[in-house]
Each structure stands twice: as C-alpha cells, then as structure tokens.
Image (cartoon, rainbow, N blue to C red):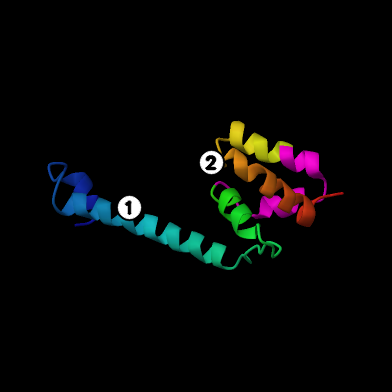
Amino acid sequence: MSVEECKVNKTMRFGACARSGVTRRVGSALAGSLLALAASAAEPRIRLATDAQAALVESRCSSCHSLDYIVMNSTFLGRAGWDAEVRKMMKVMGAPIPENDVAPIVEYLTKHYGAE
C-alpha cells in the first residue's frame, strides 16, 4: 500500500500501512549503519608501541575512547600529565581502571608517548 493510500485510509493503522512504515524505518537504519561501517573501515587502525604493557593500555583506554587520543596527547604530556590524565579518566569519566593498573599505564604512556 502506498503512503498516499495510507493517508487517505486512516483506519489502516495496522497491516499494510504499519508494515510499510516499519520497513522504511528499518531500511533507513540499515542504510545508515552500512554507511557508518564503510566510513570506519577506511580509517587506519592505531597500533600502539609494542611493549609488555601495550595490551593493558589498549584494553583499559579503548574501553572508553579511541586510541587516537593517546597519540594526540603525546605531543604535550609528560609523566605528571599522563598520571593526571589517567586519574581524570578514572575519577571524572568513570573509567574502569583499578588503582594497581595506574602506575604501569602511566609508565607505558610516558615511555612511548611522553613529551619529555
């Protein structure tokens, strides 16, 4: 049933008119998802520096944001800056980082992405 026929026949709230609306919404959502997937597929994946702590840093940091943030902040954060940044992520942003992971994360970030 066409949109015009549905507008004319307002008693058809279910059936053909309802299905056509659902189909359009699902189709639009699917098209939007595919477009977003195609756009992200073209973006190169950030690879962190290889180190014993790389997996820890990747798992803790990427649970909330892209690893791009590490690279973007590397130009101006030293040890104190990285420590403050990790603690801000925990306390302000609610990142699930246990206290005993802070030192290894800060050490890794300072060694590979520190401004010092």
Give x and y (percent) for residue 28: 38, 56
Q: Which of 74 and 52 is in front in this view?
A: 52
Residue drawn at point x = 16 percent, y = 43 percent: 13
Give the amino acid type for the residue marked by disc 1 in the picture.
Arg
Indicate whether residue 61 is drawn in magenta. no
Question: Number of marks in the image?
Answer: 2
Decide: few, some or many residues near mark 2? Use Cα within 10 Å; few <14, some 14-19, many ≥20: few
Residue plotted at (55% across, 35% down): 94
The image quarter in which residue 78 lies: top right
Q: How far apart are marks 1 and 2 (CA)?
A: 36 Å
Q: Position of residue 44 (x, y in %)?
A: 63, 66
Q: Nearer the viewer, residue 100 or 64?
A: 100
- Horizontal side of residue 52 vs 12, given as left or right: right
Q: Please give the residue where the numbered disc 2 appears in the rendered image.
A: 96
Q: Which image quadrant: the N terminus? A: bottom left
Q: In this view, does 91 lie to the left or right of 73?
A: left
**Which one is closest to the eye, mark 1 or mark 2?**
2
Q: In this view, does 65 lie to the left or right of 9?
A: right
- Secondary structure, mark 2, is loop
Decide which of 111, 36 is in the foreground and name it. 111
The location of residue 45, given as percent across then percent down, is: 62, 65
Q: Is residue 88 above or below residue 79?
A: above
Q: In this view, does 27 lie above or below 81?
A: below
Residue on which the image places disc 1: 25
Q: Residues within 10 Å of mark 1 (few under 14, many from 20)?
A: few
- What residue range appears in magenta? 64-83
Residue 108 at x, y percent in the picture: 72, 53
Name the amino acid, label 2. Pro
Name which residue lies at 79% across and 39% down: 80
Mark 1 touching mark 2, by CB under 8 A? Answer: no
